[in-house]
Image (cartoon, rainbow, N blue to C red):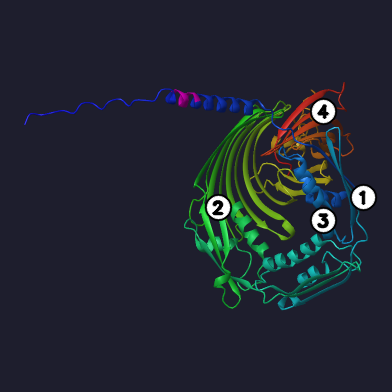
Amino acid sequence: MPATSSPPPAAPRSRPGVDSARCRVRNVTGWALFWLAWLCLLTPARAALNVDVRIDGVKGELLDNVRAYLTVEQQRADPALDEGRLRRYHQKAVKEIAEALAPFGYYQSKASASLSEKNGQWIAHYEIDPGPPVRVTEVNITLEGAGEQDPDFQKLLRNFPLHRGDILDQREYKKGKESFQRFANERGYFNFKFVTNELLIDPEANTAEVQIHVNSGERYQFGEVIFHQDVLRDDFIQRFVQFQSGSPYRIGELLDLQGALFDSDYFANIEIEPQQDLAEELRVPIEVNLTPRPKHRYTAGAGYGTDTGARGRLGWENRRINDRGHRFSADYQLSEIDESLSTRYIWPIRDPRTDEIALTTSWADEHPDVSRSETFTVGLSRTLARGSGWLENLYLKYQTESFSVGGDRGDSVLLIPGITYSRVSADNRTYPRRGLRLLFDVRGAHPAVISDHEFVQLRTQAKAVTSLGSRHRFIARGDAGTTLLDPIRSLPASVRFFTGGSQSVRGYAYNTLAPRNDQNQVVGGEHLLVGSLEYEYRFAQKWSAALFFDKGNAINDWQEPLKEGAGFGLRWVSPVGPIRIDFAWGLSAPGTPFRLHINVGPDL
């Protein structure tokens, strides 16, 4: 059969006028929506109501809390606030004021409220009469359990912040309860609980009673300390622990352990986790997870000081020579007035936080304007912690020196034994608000033991920092020394006294204050005496202004006059310590010369 095809369907026929009318309706609707959208865009947004909230009758903390409770105060700047919402918020205000005053002991407050509008500004005015306060008539706090034998727990109860006759402050009540719970957690009373915990308030009589009965439960003890690390021997790392298994639990001991491990520089991260759920016979195992620092550390730095000029430094340290915590470091320094290279091998002993033996070597070429000295030194020292924060450093140093100072030139060999006692206590070593540094040093040499000179030298240094308020800081420092036996002109430059510069008497060049020879050349002195007073005023977070007065000299006779310097300066607290810029005048020099001193470093 021959193929056939169907004819295409005929186009639909429309009724005259119907489709054209539909088209016009669609066009009209589209234009209406278009113009409606434009009208919405062109209509200006409604301006927020201008509301002023005025509160009279209370001040201070009461006023602050009322404002925090008032919805009308919190919402008055809301762009969507309209008159209806404003009136609803205003109707709640009297109740909110009563709620705001109750925690402060005012349960019979009265408030009058008014809301008015004039020239577009709304005024919500509240006149408050807080009424008579509720006063505490009884504080009854009892303790049972092992805490009854703990003097510190008993003291905490006696120092509860609410007392009979006080105006009731519910914040103090809450603070007192929280102090019990915090103390219990810190001292190992892990089963502590409140048997009774009531604040009984009679608003009509304006009285309140505190009824607290606590059971401390048993006090837990320290158990075994388990370290998780693989870089140091366990018997070495255990020496960082200052408490014994079986001693009473104190969270402060754990914080001290964490700080000591971090300060040791062996570890980058220290996590200490008391395992209370694993306690047996009230002994809590302590797990310490340690993440080691990289074995090698490289340092480089550059800077500038008016005493040294431009300076730079390169350093390398091996933090862990072996698993007994030995370490080695090398340091190279270069400035306009000196060059030095030193090495130091340290092995910890006894308490690794403070006690160590160190073998040191150094070469130094110092050439300030007034002298030149090239020394090579090999030293052995032992440092031990003594009571009350004192460190004892017993040392023996072999030193060769070639020197030139004034008209004196020579070569010397010295075997110098000595002992130093030092102590530093501060709230912050870099920039302390309160702190004290003390140092006492005695050293000497004798021809009977290798040396070609005989001398005994004593030196003491002190620096104290104290503060008044948050903006005022006072700094006092002193430095004194004396040399006995051989005449000072026969001794090498390294054991003569000089002063002057940014760290001693400001207003004078570095090491230029000392006795002089007939050619007016500085030759150094037998004695040293320096004192300084400084006042700082902090005018910004990291900026301070300073005024200072320095007095001192290196002398051969205690009757010789001391030189004076004074001036002002700027301080900026950097991460490595204050950057000090001092403008100083040498008051005792002819013409009162001016010098600029720049110095960077921690205060203590």
Q: What amino acid is found at the position of numbered circle 4 in the picture?
A: Ala
Residues drawn in magenta: 20-24
Q: Vertically, is 193 above or below 227?
A: below
Residue assigned mark 2: 269
Which quarter of the rendered picture does the N terminus lie within? top left
Of labels 4 and 2, the one closer to you: 2
Q: Secondary structure beneath disc 4?
A: strand
Q: How far apart are marks 3 and 2 (CA)?
A: 52 Å
Q: Earlier in the sequence, mark 3 or mark 2?
A: 3
Q: Where is residue 417 in the image (x, y as percent from the top left)?
A: 67, 49
Badge nearest the viewer, 4 or 1: 1
Q: How crowded is mark 1: few (under 14 residues within 10 Å), some or many (20 or more)?
A: few
Q: Which of 254 and 488 is in front in this view?
A: 254
Q: Give the camera-side residue of 131 and 162.
A: 131
- The circle drawn on residue 584 is 4
Which residue type does callout 2 highlight?
Asn
Calculate the distance from the C-alpha at mark 1 to the C-alpha at mark 2. Answer: 55 Å
Quick one: 436 or 411, which is closer to the camera?
436
Looking at the image, is 476 positioned above or below residue 513?
below
What type is the residue that disc 1 sits on?
A: Gly
SS for dot 3? helix
Q: Within the magenta stretch, is there residue 22?
A: yes
Query: SS for tag 1?
Result: loop
